[in-house]
């Protein structure tokens, strides 16, 4: 299928006036039909060369999640205003300056025009395929509630992005400080300590045991420098790449992340918020639970929770309620299955899931607010013990020399 192009056209309207302008279309025939809708007869048209368009609109071709979210929200607004799907997609393509997004909208319009539903049109773009997005759009089409579901999808994606950014910002500070502390410690051992060692050699006096231990550690580090650096590089590469190719390694990494003090609680609460909030939307959309849970599991980043959600699916297939299935999965705080049992008994499980999501979001916000106040003293003490200890080890002989004099 051809992609959308920008045409410069000339024509005559019904009043006989000459008209000209720029429009997006896949071919002359589509451009002609588009102008006829506006009561303009096409006389000539010339497509803008691709390289000229890229020069005129230097935007990157990649499409991020935020742009897809904005597209869904704007599409919902246009459909809610009564504009047909094809015209809405065309209007969005005409108003965007992002080359990749405009081409995506052009492909979606072509597929919808050929008779495809919107969910199938999105599914054909494999690099944009999101199982949760496709399942929700498909549910909206089946229930004739596509427009309100598009609003909900956009809101859910925006909340998920906000949640990811919040967790990343919360964990960025301690990780950065500890990494810098490690680099400073390494620099002291490799470059600073040897200078003091040469200075102490001129004293001819016996060094304190603490200073001798630090000098010995520096000598060993420098003597095995290339080996240590290579081993560290291999460990970093294996830690980063092995989970991508080995499911057991990825599962082990995710399980260890959940056991990290404070940070593990943040990751756990974020996973619960995403799970409950998305599950509420899918149940409200009418997607069966046995179909919902596998799709939802694929959207969770932590594999421990993916495994728990799939275990829930198996338990539900065996006839258990969702509250019992969640309790058997043994990955959620005990209060959550109890609250879900109340929601199932009252027939308001979607509302209860939303309440749980709001409750966990509030707990997550409190955890993140207290994260800096709790981690900062620990980091300061650690920096004082490591870097301050190294500095003290280097100056102990100087203090002893001064007292001897």
Image (spheres, grey):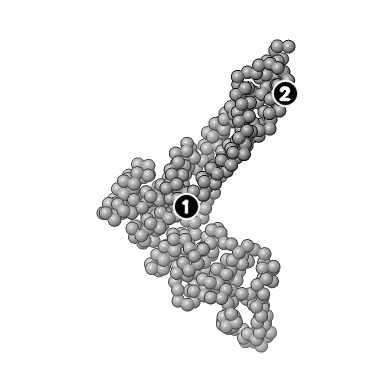
Answer with left or right where residue 41 lies relative to residue 122: right
Q: Which mark is on residue 245?
A: 1
Residue at horizontal 54 percent and vertical 49 percent from the top: 165
Residue 44: x %, y % from top left: 66, 84
Q: Position of residue 2 (x, y in %)?
A: 56, 76
Q: Quadrant of the C terminus?
A: top right
Outermost residue, top side: 404
Q: Is residue 129 above or below residue 179?
A: below
Q: On the rendered structure, is 83 left or right of 403? A: left
Q: Are marks 2 and 1 in contact (CB under 8 Å)?
A: no
Q: Is residue 274 above or below residue 147?
A: above
Asked which secondary structure carries label 2, the reply is helix
Of the numbered discs 2 and 1, the one sitting upstream in the chain is 2
Q: Is residue 170 visible?
A: no
In which image quadrant can residue 393 be found? top right
Res. 363 mark: none
Q: Position of residue 175 (x, y in %)?
A: 56, 40
User: Few, some or many C-alpha atoms within 10 Å of disc 2 (few <14, some 14-19, many ≥20)?
Assistant: few
Pointer 2 residue: 199
Q: Secondary structure at mark 1?
A: helix
Asked if residue 234 shows in the view, the reply is: yes
Is residue 34 or residue 198 the one in the foreground? 198
Q: Is residue 277 left or right of residue 183?
A: left
Q: Is residue 202 above or below residue 334?
A: above
Which residue is at 71% across, 28% downward? 195
| Residue at image point 57% right, 73% down | 3
Rounded to the nearest angstrom, the CA distance separating label 2 from label 1 is 51 Å
Residue 237 location (% of width, % of height) = 54, 46
User: Against 197, is 332 above or below?
Assistant: below
Kindly identify the residue that appears in the image at 53 percent across and 62 percent down: 68
């Amino acid at each position: 299928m051809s992609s959308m192009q920008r045409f410069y056209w000339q024509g005559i309207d019904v009043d006989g006036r000459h008209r000209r302008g720029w429009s997006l279309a896949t071919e002359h025939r589509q451009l002609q039909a588009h102008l006829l809708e506006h009561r303009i007869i096409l006389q000539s048209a010339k497509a803008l060369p691709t390289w000229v368009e890229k020069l005129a609109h230097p935007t990157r071709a990649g499409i991020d999640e935020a742009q897809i979210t904005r597209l869904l929200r704007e599409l919902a607004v246009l459909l809610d205003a009564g504009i047909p799907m094809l015209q809405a997609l065309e209007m969005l393509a005409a108003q965007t300056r992002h080359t990749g997004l405009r081409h995506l909208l052009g492909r979606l319009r072509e597929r919808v025009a050929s008779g495809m539903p919107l969910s199938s049109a999105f599914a054909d773009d494999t690099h944009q395929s999101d199982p949760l997005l496709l399942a929700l759009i498909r549910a909206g089409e089946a229930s004739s509630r596509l427009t309100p579901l598009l609003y909900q999808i956009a809101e859910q994606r925006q909340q998920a992005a906000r949640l990811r950014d919040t967790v990343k910002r919360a964990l960025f500070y301690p990780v950065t400080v500890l990494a810098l502390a490690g680099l400073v410690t390494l620099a002291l051992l490799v470059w600073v300590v040897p200078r003091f060692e040469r200075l102490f050699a001129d004293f001819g006096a016996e060094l304190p045991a603490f200073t001798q231990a630090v000098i010995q550690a520096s000598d060993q580090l420098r003597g095995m420098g290339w080996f240590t650096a290579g081993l560290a590089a291999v460990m970093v590469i294996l830690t980063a790449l092995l989970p991508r190719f080995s499911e057991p390694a990825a599962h082990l990494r995710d399980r260890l992340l959940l056991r990290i003090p404070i940070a593990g609680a943040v990751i756990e609460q974020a996973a619960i918020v995403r799970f409950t909030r998305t599950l509420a939307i899918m149940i409200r959309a009418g997607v069966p639970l046995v179909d919902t849970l596998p799709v939802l599991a694929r959207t969770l980043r932590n594999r421990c929770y993916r495994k728990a959600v799939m275990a829930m699916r198996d338990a539900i297939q065996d006839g258990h309620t969702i509250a019992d299935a969640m309790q058997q999965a043994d990955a959620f705080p005990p209060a959550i299955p109890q609250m879900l049992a109340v929601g199932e008994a009252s027939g308001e499980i979607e509302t209860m899931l939303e309440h749980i999501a709001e409750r966990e979001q509030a707990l997550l916000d409190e955890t993140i607010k207290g994260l800096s106040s709790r981690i900062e003293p620990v980091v300061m003490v650690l920096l004082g013990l490591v870097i301050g200890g190294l500095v003290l080890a280097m100056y102990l002989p100087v203090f002893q020399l001064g007292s001897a004099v």
